[in-house]
Image (cartoon, rainbow, N blue to C red):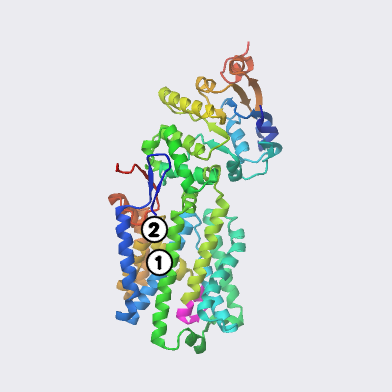
Amino acid sequence: MAVLLELDRVDKSYGALRVADGITLDVADGEALGVIGPNGAGKSTLFNLITGDVAPDSGRVRFGGADITAMAPYRRSRLGIGRSYQIPHPFSNMTVFENLLVGGIFGAGRSEKESHAHCVEVLCLTGLIERANAAAGSLTLLQRKRLELARALAMRPKLLLLDEIGGGLTEHECNELVETIRAIHARGTTIIWIEHIVHALVSVASRLIVLDFGQLIAEGEPRAVMADARVQEIYMGIPAS
Amino acid sequence: MNESQVSASPFIVERSTRVSQVSAVVATLGLAVLISLPYWGSTGSMRLIAEMAYFLALAQLWNLLAGYAGLVSVGQQVYIGIGGYVLFASADWYNVHPLLAILISGIAAAIISLPMALIVFRLRGAYFAVGTWVVAEIFNLFVAQVPKLGGGSGYSLTPDIVRSVAPDRAVREMLMYWMALALSVAIIAMVYLLLRSRHGLALTAIRDSESASESLGVDTYRTKLMIYIVTALCSGLLGGFIFLQKLRISPESAFSINDWTVVVIFMVVIGGIGTMEGPILGLLIYFAMRELLADYGSWYLILLGVVAVAVMLTAREGLWGLIAKRYDLHPFPVRRRLVRPPAS
């Protein structure tokens, strides 16, 4: 399968703190990749390096074969990298529908009229259609999480980065969201998903990577990775005997 | 024009409401009355309305800049001053017709705003505000050093130039009044259409979350730069016009932070920043207070300050914010509503 995203020995430090330590990673077109690791392991930094919110100290980032290491975040979005934030960043003073239009017009590069139908479709897919005219600031947590997802989808991403989108939700809410994400993946969108709720993650992801202190310490088929002694020790807190 | 059918889905996108249709009619009728004012009103009322018109335009421009693009500038007087001086220089030195000179004023302000933006855009928040003010003061001091521009004491337009607008004084008054109206209405309409367009969507998004806007493909730097240049252009046009009407210019009056920025900020903040309606309400309050209290000298300024502080403490979204919240009233909507059309 063709490689969509490539990280090549990417380093990033804040003073003495290494948040990305020689990360090399290939993500195939159409893949669903799960990312786990303890708090502060550099998971969100990994996303910021991919979206361009953070510039690496060294190493290269390639997307669809093109080097995007020095590219501005908005241009990467236009290439097809969409993200949802761990803490939702809704455009509070706009309606839910208008939130999606921003992605449809600027991210996907369509005219407003062309974006309307697609945004309505995404609203239906993410279960937000009944809230289309509500101010985004008035949404519940679940709806905000859905809006994060919907807004990223409105820009027709090739690669979707989900940062703890299940965090803070009840189990039922989380399961609903997982179904939506599975449907998005089934349509051919490549997904990288950071999540602490491992069973939700492995129900979609076919491959798992584990980060710790900015290093990629394990990678592979989810069950094998979770059974790895180092992962059990670092991530689950079970000491290796 | 206000609705578009979303293809293959049972929804349409609405841009207008009953209230906005009524207010469009009211605004059109009001404008018609104002256009006819020279035929039945006094010179004094014409001057007052002209002043209110260009202050409303200035308020909408500052609202666009600060309330939408998040560029809280306290140095917009620099473009008024540049506009005024460019008008005087081109009319006096190069014998450009004054009406054409107004256009040159706007273009000059826009051209100067580009390198200026490259400097002040490096600053954020309060530093940006102070930076814009400093730049305006530098222009003020610089112009005062140029003898050919009248130095610190300023200079007046020659009678010949004044007569070239229109030989007859009464005709000139009418012409200047209509120009104030036309220029202001054009600028306000431009701001409104901009806010209703995709650029308005990008601006509101940037205001609410800059990083999320970038992640959705919005070029935040270029959007802000565009707004900064557009407001400079319009401020330059207004500056050219204002000093053509005043016939006299000096660095103190042209680059006055009080006259061109503080008063404008008062209107926008009191009325309600980040809405089209707020600056209109603020304008009416400011002029009402000025007309009623002008005889009390400095007490009038103190009272303005008290009102500003009181409103900021009790109604952070301005007086229009209170009204809009209570009655859900939006005479000049910029939003899009997704509705199912009534079954036909």
Q: Nearer the viewer, residue B255 or B171?
A: B171
Please give the range of residues in magenta. Answer: B243-255
Image mark 2: chain: B
**Residue B50 seen anywhere in this rendered image of the structure:** yes
Q: Position of residue A135 (x, y in %)?
A: 38, 43
Q: Amino acid at mark 1?
A: Leu
Image mark 1: chain: B
Under circle 1, the secondary element is helix
- Which label sits on residue B69? none
Q: Nearer the viewer, residue B45 or B311?
A: B45
Q: Position of residue B48 (x, y in %)?
A: 36, 75
B216 vs B50: above or below: above
B116 vs B314: above or below: below
Q: Where, by quadrant of the figure, is residue B24 drawn?
A: bottom left
Q: Earlier in the sequence, mark 2 or mark 1?
A: 1
Number of residue marks: 2
Q: Point out the image quarter for the C terminus of chain A.
A: top right
Q: Which residue is mark 1?
A: B56
Q: Amino acid at mark 2?
A: Met
Q: Which residue is mark 2?
A: B276
Could you tell me what secondary structure mostly forms the magenta stretch?
helix
- Asked if the stretch drawn in magenta spans residue A26, the answer is no
Crowding at dot 1, Cα within 10 Å, few <14 / some 14-19 / many 20+, comes out as many
